[in-house]
Amino acid sequence: MQHHRKVAAAAAQQAGKIIADAYRTDFQVYYKEGTLTNLVTEVDRRSEAAIVEVIGAAFPKHRILAEEGGEASRKDSPYRWYVDPLDGTTNFAHGFPVFCVSIGLEADGHMILGVVYDPLRRELFEAETGQGAFLNGERIRVSKVADLHKALLVTGFPYDHAGRKENLPYFSRFALESQGVRRTGSAALDLCYVAAGRIDGFWELDLRPWDVAAGSLMVTEAGGKVTDFLGHPFSVHGSQTLATNSLIHEAMASVIAGT
């Protein structure tokens, strides 16, 4: 596993350099699926190409599911990499400094490794199954806030307007029931912030596997809890993500159920 971790970290940091070098320069912005809300830039694609090249060279038989390029490599491998080359593209395109690279590794259907790199803050989050979660080599743990009213929460909104509308009742209720709610625009970083104790709880709808693969493992390895909104076991292929320090998990699930 150490080799997998080193390769993932190297890939994330190489992609992060591409992103940081391009930040606040001129780059081409495209719109996915004919929408005006779902962006992709040439930097996303360059970052993804670098990651796929590094992982592919080290593990040529592994499967790679990447946001922009789809799934590649052998279909019969028990290993699958989940790659988000630039989580927070809209932030990046506007010059808002909150975005990251996210890489997760699954073996036989179970997440075993997660790496998230924030290139502007040079923060490297890493987690391995049973080994804990780390930020720049130092172990991180979730917060000890046990009262939802004293908790700082974070959420995100889907690209489509219908999905945004669906989350508004939850946002309104949590804004009243917590100390505050943030919306950063990067689900991968949100999950890492829960793992690091900077945020106490996170919820979001309609995330994709590459958004949550690394971050969900980060939370559990830091002592937190990740489920769907009903408290059922979490899946990166599901449509609901509820991640907390575990202490406010039941309270957050109750708010969602009552909304």
Image (cartoon, rainbow, N blue to C red):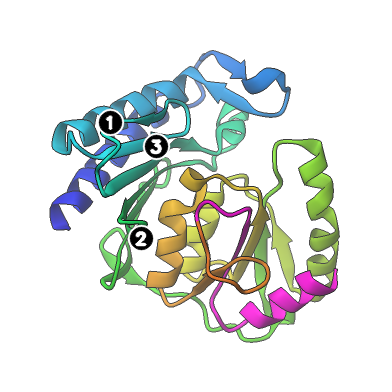
To which residue does mark 3 refer?
65
Between residue 105 and residue 29, name the one nearer to us: 105
Q: Position of residue 241 (x, y in %)?
A: 60, 60
Does residue 235 sit above or below 100 in this rendering?
Answer: below
User: Are the two marked residues, 2 and 1, in contact with CB atoms closer than 8 angstroms?
Assistant: no
Name which quarter of the figure residue 215 lies in: bottom left
Tell me the amino acid under the disc marked 3: Leu
Name which quarter of the figure residue 109 lies in: bottom left
Q: In the image, which disc is placed on residue 73?
A: 1
To which residue does mark 2 refer?
110
Q: Mark 3 or 1 closer to N-term?
A: 3
Tell me the amino acid under the disc marked 1: Ser
Tell me the magenta residue range. 236-259
Tell me the amino acid under the disc marked 2: His
Q: Which residue occupies 73% across, 23% down?
A: 36
Quarter of the image with the C terminus in it: bottom right
Left or right, 229 with respect to 122, comes to right
Q: Which residue occupies 73% across, 67% down?
A: 180
Crowding at mark 3 (Cα within 10 Å: few <14, some 14-19, many 20+): many
